Image: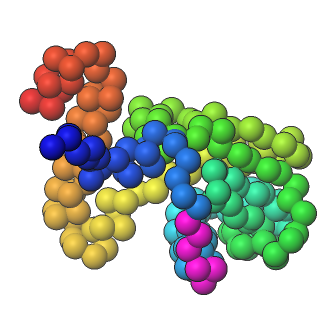
Amino acid sequence: MGAMATSSPFSLLQGIFSGARLPDFQPPAWVVDEGRRRVVLLLNHILSQEGEAMARLARQQGRIVHLKWRSFSMSLVATPAGLLDLAAQGATPDLVLEVTQESAWELAQVALRGDRPAVQIEGDVQWAAEVNWLVDHVRWDLEEDLARVLGDAPAHAVAQAARQVAKTLRDFIGAGSSTDAAKALA
């Protein structure tokens, strides 16, 4: 009897993380739309905690930035309130930001190192400078949000554990060899 070819059950995930082309799967339009709305809510929650960020966005009201990575894209418009909203379908963006890193795995590695991914920028330079300022200066205080729900002590413990996990992952990714990786996980 000949040998049977088998593949790992993780081969699909490996393909996703390596940036390999997968069969074109398009979720229903309502799922994509709802996902975009949730992203806008999260961004506005974070922005609302930074007065300077809101003031800068308010000065850019009506300007549109189009974000793109692989098959994901969304256009956001700055509102008079200094927040973001989904831009009208088909609206012409003033700025296009496209993440050029194709591999989700490599993109995650870049993020865990605290680096920025490679981005192709097209459009208004002043608007690009404002978006860059937002990326550099606005941070989500997740621990404060958790404290509202869980209380101060549990939120601090969860945040501390998350920081340790992130540090371990950064050490693991930064490790040059498998022995260094094993030490980083120990």
Q: Residue at x 17, y 56 (%)?
A: 157
- Residue 21 in view: yes
Magenta region includes residue 29 = yes
Q: Coloring scheme of the render?
A: rainbow
Q: Quadrant of residue 147?
A: bottom left
On the rendered structure, is 48 left or right of 13?
Answer: right
Identity of the residue furthest to the left in this view:
186
Q: Could you tell me which residue is drawn at 82 percent across and 76 percent down?
A: 88
Q: Picture coordinates of residue 91 (x, y %)?
A: 88, 69
**Residue at the image position 59 percent from the left and 61 percent from the top:** 24
Q: Quadrant of the N terminus?
A: top left
Write the residue at 74% across / 38% down. Answer: 120
Q: Is residue 128 above or below residue 52?
A: above
- Front position in the image: 127 or 7: 7
* Image quadrant assignment for residue 51: bottom right
Residue 142, quarter of picture: bottom left
- Kindly tell me whether residue 37 is visible in this rendering: no
Image coordinates for residue 75, horizontal then vertical, percent: 74, 64
Of residues 64 and 152, the one drawn nearer to the viewer in this rendering: 64
Quarter of the picture holding the C terminus: top left
Considering only vertical position in the picture, is 131 above or below 148?
Answer: above
**Closer-to-camera residue (178/185):** 178
Task: Single out the residue that lies furthest toward the bottom.
Answer: 30
Magenta span includes 69: no
Which residue is at the far front?
1
Q: Main secondary structure of the magenta part?
A: loop
Q: Is residue 137 above or below residue 30?
A: above
Asked if residue 143 lies left or right of residue 185, the reply is right
Q: Which residues are magenta?
A: 25-30
Measured from the top left, where is residue 57 in percent x and y?
74, 60
